[in-house]
Amino acid sequence: MIFLVKIMGVVGSPRKEGNTNYLVKEALKAASNLGVETELINLGDIEIEPCIACDICKSTGECAIFDDVPSLLGKLVDSQGVIMGSPVYFGNVTSQLKMLIDRSRPLRMDFKLKNKIGGAISVGGSRNGGQETTISSIHQFMLIHDMIIVGDGAPLAHYGGTGVGSTINSAAGDEVGLETSRNLGQNVAELALQISKK
């Protein structure tokens, strides 16, 4: 089978297996049920350095730092949709995800992510544990790249996947987190498929 649409999942957690990873995987499973190709990248598995404000990307369109980020940016460009997840760290994304966001600047030189479908997932230690502020930061990244943002849609209609997990793998028992994450994955895939037909 030839896939025409690919959805990338990016997990911003430093943990290789944890609640955010679990919910992003659930979102990708829901997306793959619609016939799209999916790939998961966990930032805890790759070498990623912070932006050093050298401005080389402004003239070359490429990042001058030699780590795993340029390869990951290429994967984002080659995808039609991106599901980005982060645990809540002091009401915001992790440092790993923020480094990727800052290092994505070369893609904005000519808006390589324009009109790609984006969605966000976040996991906090309690139901109102900063998920919405963390998702908002991911949405800001997507808006600045001129992406199209979707949420988890009806019947719950949140900002995206909003999970609770105070201990490792406890999000597996969070029905709201599971439902919103699966709905988000489905919505990202559905819109990406619709746009790809045009």
Image: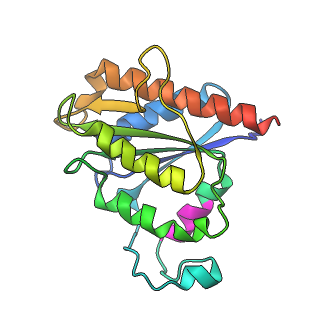
Say how the picture is coloured: rainbow
Quarter of the image where the N terminus is located? top right
Q: Which residue is drawn at 49% across and 29% down?
A: 184
Q: Residue 4's spot in the image, x, y percent?
A: 76, 41
Horizontal arrangement in the rendering, residue 54 relative to residue 133 (left or right): right
- Front residue of 41 and 107: 107
- Front residue of 59 and 42: 59
Q: What stretch is highlighted in magenta?
A: 68-74
Q: Residue 9's spot in the image, x, y percent?
A: 50, 45
Q: Residue 192's spot in the image, x, y percent?
A: 67, 36
- Would you identify the image quadrant in which residue 23 lies? top left
Quarter of the image where the C terminus is located? top right
**Relative height, residue 60 to residue 171 (above, below):** below
Q: Residue at x 32, y 45 (%)?
A: 134
Residue furthest top as drawn: 155
* Number of numbered discs on residues: 0
- Would you identify the image quadrant in which residue 38 lies? top right
- Front residue of 113 and 82: 113
**Relative height, residue 174 to residue 46 (above, below):** above
- Please identify the dominant SS of the magenta region: helix
Q: Residue 67's spot in the image, x, y percent?
A: 46, 75
Horizontal arrangement in the rendering, residue 176 relative to residue 65 (left or right): left
Q: Which residue is drawn at 30% across and 31% down?
A: 163
In reply to whether residue 152 is colored magenta, the answer given is no
Horizontal arrangement in the rendering, residue 103 relative to residue 16 (left or right): right
**Relative height, residue 188 to residue 9 (above, below):** above
